[in-house]
Amino acid sequence: MGIEPPDEGAVRWGGGPLTHADRLAFGYMPEQRGLYPKMRVRDHVVYLARLHGLTAGQAAAPDELLNLRRSG
């Protein structure tokens, strides 16, 4: 996923080096259950977006994707 660089060797996919485009096709579940019980859905989306490579600015604005309105 590119979260941690390899200590040695290389990651290959389909006979060639793993590219950024390849990694975009993969999913990543950060823990067995996948969601933290006390974290709001919006916060999960931001967290997972950051893991997936979005910048802080891009990840901090998921409301359009979730069709949410902030209250307060």
Image (cartoon, rainbow, N blue to C red):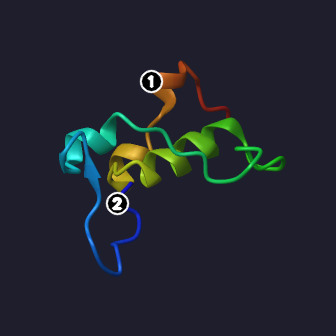
- The numbered disc on residue 2 is 2
Question: Residue 58 in the image: x percent, y percent?
Answer: 34, 44
Q: What residue type is labelled 1?
A: Glu
Q: Would you say residue 72 is visible in this rendering? A: no
Q: How crowded is mark 2: few (under 14 residues within 10 Å), some or many (20 or more)?
A: few
Looking at this view, name the residue that lies furthest to the top: 67
Quadrant location, the N terminus: bottom left
Q: What residue type is labelled 2?
A: Gly
Of badges 1 and 2, the one in the foreground is 2
Residue tagged 1: 64
Question: Residue 55 in the image: x percent, y percent?
Answer: 32, 53
CA gap between label 1 and label 2 equals 27 Å
Q: Residues within 10 Å of mark 1 (few under 14, many from 20)?
A: few
Say which residue appears at 55% left-offset and 40% top-offset: 45
On screen, residue 27 above or below 60:
above
Say which residue appears at 34% left-offset and 73% top-offset: 6
Q: Would you say residue 24 is visible in this rendering? A: yes
Asked which secondary structure carries label 2, the reply is loop
Asked whether disc 1 touches disc 2, contact meaning CB atoms under 8 Å apart, the reply is: no
